[in-house]
Image: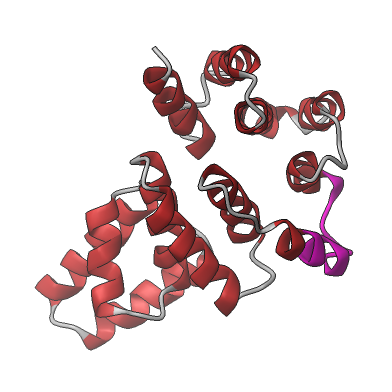
Amino acid sequence: MPAVFFVALLGMAMLLPAGKAQAQNADFDACLAFDRKACDAVLGAQAGNLTALFMRGLAAELAGDDAAALQDFDATAGREPRHFGAQLWRHVAAATLKQSRAAELSAYLANAKQLPAWPRALAELYLEEASPEATLALAEAQPQAARAEAVCAAEYHIGRHAYLKGDVEAAKTHFHAALATGAAHVFEYQAAERAMAGMK
C-alpha cells in the first residue's frame, strides 16, 4: 500500500471507533479491488477521497457503465489535472460514448513534460501520435519485474483503440494477447476479460 494511503488510514483509525475504522479500511481495500459499492461507501464517508473516486470510475468501466465512469474520470481530472489515469480513461470512456476528450488529453500531454515515454505512449496511441507497434515496444522494454503488467496494458489499449475504430477482429487479437500475459491483478487484464466476454 502506498505510504500516503497508509498514513491517511492510520489517521482515520485514530479518530474513529475501532469497529468503524476497520469497516472503512475494509471498504477502501475493496474499492482498490474495483468494488463499486465499496467505493460508494468510501466516498460517502470521505467525499474528497480522490483515489476512491478514480477507482469507482474504473469499477464502472468494468461494469460497462461508461457514462458513470466518464463522470468519475472527469471529476478526478477536474480535481487533479495531473492524474494520468483519469486523463487517459476519460478519453477512452468518452470515445466509447461518441464524445470527445481529445482536446483535454492533448492539453494534458503538452503540460506533462516529465511524463515518461511509457506510459505516455498509451495516451499518444489514442491520439494517433504513437503507433501500436511503438506502444508495444515500449511496454516490452520495461524492466522484467514490470514487463508483464506493461505488456498487458499495452495490448489492452491497442485492442480498445482498434475496437473504437471498428476493427473488431484486431481488438479480439490484442485482448487475447493481454490475457496471455497472465497479469490478472492488472485492471486492463480484467477489462480485457470483460471485453472478450462481450464479443462472444
* Residue 99 falls inside the magenta stretch: no
Residue shown at the point (37%, 40%) measured from the top left: 64
> Image check: 161 left or right of 176?
right
Q: Which residues are magenta?
A: 106-117
Q: Quadrant of residue 48?
A: bottom left
- Residue in the picture at 48% in, 58% down: 70
Residue furthest out toward the front:
98
Q: Which one is nearer the viewer's eye here, 62 or 92? A: 92
Where does residue 69 sit, x and y in percent of width and height?
Answer: 43, 55
**x, y (%) of residue 104?**
72, 65
Q: How many marks?
A: 0
* Side (left or right) of 78 relative to 136: left
Residue at 45% from the left image edge and 64% from the top image edge? 71
121 to the left or right of 75: right
Across and down, in percent, residue 106 comes to 80, 60
> How was this image coloured?
secondary structure
* Whether residue 55 is situated above or below residue 5 in the rendered picture: above
Q: Quadrant of residue 178?
A: top right
